[in-house]
Image: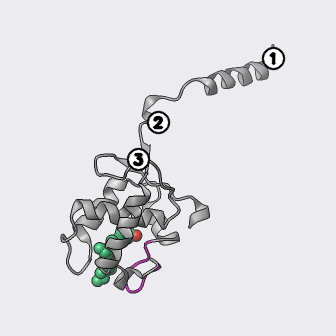
C-alpha cells in the first residue's frame, strides 16, 4: 500500500474515533417559547425599548439584535448575558431586575437573534453557549 493511501486510511480511522468528552460538554443555548413570550412582556413592562428600541434595533442604547449583538455574544455563555442584564440593566437603575426576570428577558433577546427555541428551558443553572449563525445577523 502506498504511503499516501496509508495516510488517508489513518486519517479516516482518526476521524471515526469518538470526539473527546470535553469537546461535547458545552450545551447549546436553549429556551422555551413560554420564556420568550414572558420575556417580551417584561421587555415592554420594564421599558427596555426606550433605549434599545421596540424591535431591539437600538435607540440611544445599543441594538440587542443583528451584527453588533452577534459580535458581542456569539460563542459566549448564556449565564454571562443573564448576569449582565441582572447586574447592569436597565442602565439607569442597575440591579433592579431579578435573576428570573433577567432569564426571561434573555430568552426573548435570543429569540430575536435567530436562536431556535427548544424543550430545555434557559436557566442560570444550565451553562450553555450562544450560537448566532451569520444568516441571522
Ligand atoms: C436608559 C437606557 C437603557 C435602558 C432603559 C436599558 N438599557 Fe440596556 N443598555 C443601555 C446601554 C447604554 C448599554 C451599553 C452599556 C455599555 O456598553 O456599557 C446597554 C447594554 C445592554 C445589553 C448588552 C448589549 C451587548 O451587546 O452587549 C443588554 C443585553 C441590555 N442592555 C439589555 C437591556 C434590557 C433587557 C433592558 C430592560 C430591562 C435594558 N437593557 C434597559 C441602555 C439601556
Range of magenta residues: 57-64
Picture quarter with the C terminus: bottom right
The residue most toward the right is 2
Q: Is residue 98 left or right of residue 35?
A: left
The residue most toward the top is 1
Question: Where 114 falls versus 125 (above or below)?
Answer: below
SS class of the residue under badge 2? helix
Q: Earlier in the sequence, mark 1 or mark 3?
A: 1
**Residue to which mark 2 is pinned:** 23
The Cα atoms of the two marked residues, 2 and 3, are separated by: 20 Å
Q: Is residue 2 magenta?
A: no
Is the CB–ligand 1 distance for label 3 below 8 Å? no
Is the CB–ligand 1 distance for label 2 below 8 Å? no
Q: Main secondary structure of the magenta part?
A: loop
Q: Residue at x 20, y 78 (%)?
A: 93
Q: Report the front residue among 51 and 67.
A: 51
Neighbourhood count class around disc 1 (C-alpha, 10 Å): few under 14, some 14–19, many 20 upward: few
Q: Residue at x 43, y 61 (%)?
A: 73
Q: Nearer the viewer, mark 2 or mark 3?
A: 3
Q: Nearer the viewer, mark 1 or mark 2?
A: 2
Residue 109, percent from left and from top: 42, 67
Neighbourhood count class around disc 3 (C-alpha, 10 Å): few under 14, some 14–19, many 20 upward: few
Q: Is residue 103 visible?
A: yes
Residue 82, percent from left and from top: 31, 60
**Residue to which mark 1 is pinned:** 2
SS class of the residue under badge 1? loop
**Residue to which mark 3 is pinned:** 120
Q: Residue at x 65, y 21 (%)?
A: 13
Amino acid at each position: 500500500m502506498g504511503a499516501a493511501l496509508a495516510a488517508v486510511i489513518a486519517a479516516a480511522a482518526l476521524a471515526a474515533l469518538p470526539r473527546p468528552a470535553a469537546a461535547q460538554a458545552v450545551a447549546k443555548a436553549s429556551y422555551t417559547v413560554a420564556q420568550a413570550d414572558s420575556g417580551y412582556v417584561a421587555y415592554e413592562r420594564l421599558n427596555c425599548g426606550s433605549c434599545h428600541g421596540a424591535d431591539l434595533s437600538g435607540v440611544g442604547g445599543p441594538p440587542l439584535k443583528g451584527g453588533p449583538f452577534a459580535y458581542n455574544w456569539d460563542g459566549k455563555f448564556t449565564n454571562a448575558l443573564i448576569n449582565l442584564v441582572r447586574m447592569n440593566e436597565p442602565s439607569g437603575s442597575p440591579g433592579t431586575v431579578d435573576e428570573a426576570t433577567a432569564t426571561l428577558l434573555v430568552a426573548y433577546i435570543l429569540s430575536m437573534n435567530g436562536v431556535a427555541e427548544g424543550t430545555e428551558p434557559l436557566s442560570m443553572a444550565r451553562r450553555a453557549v450562544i450560537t448566532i449563525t451569520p444568516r441571522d445577523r
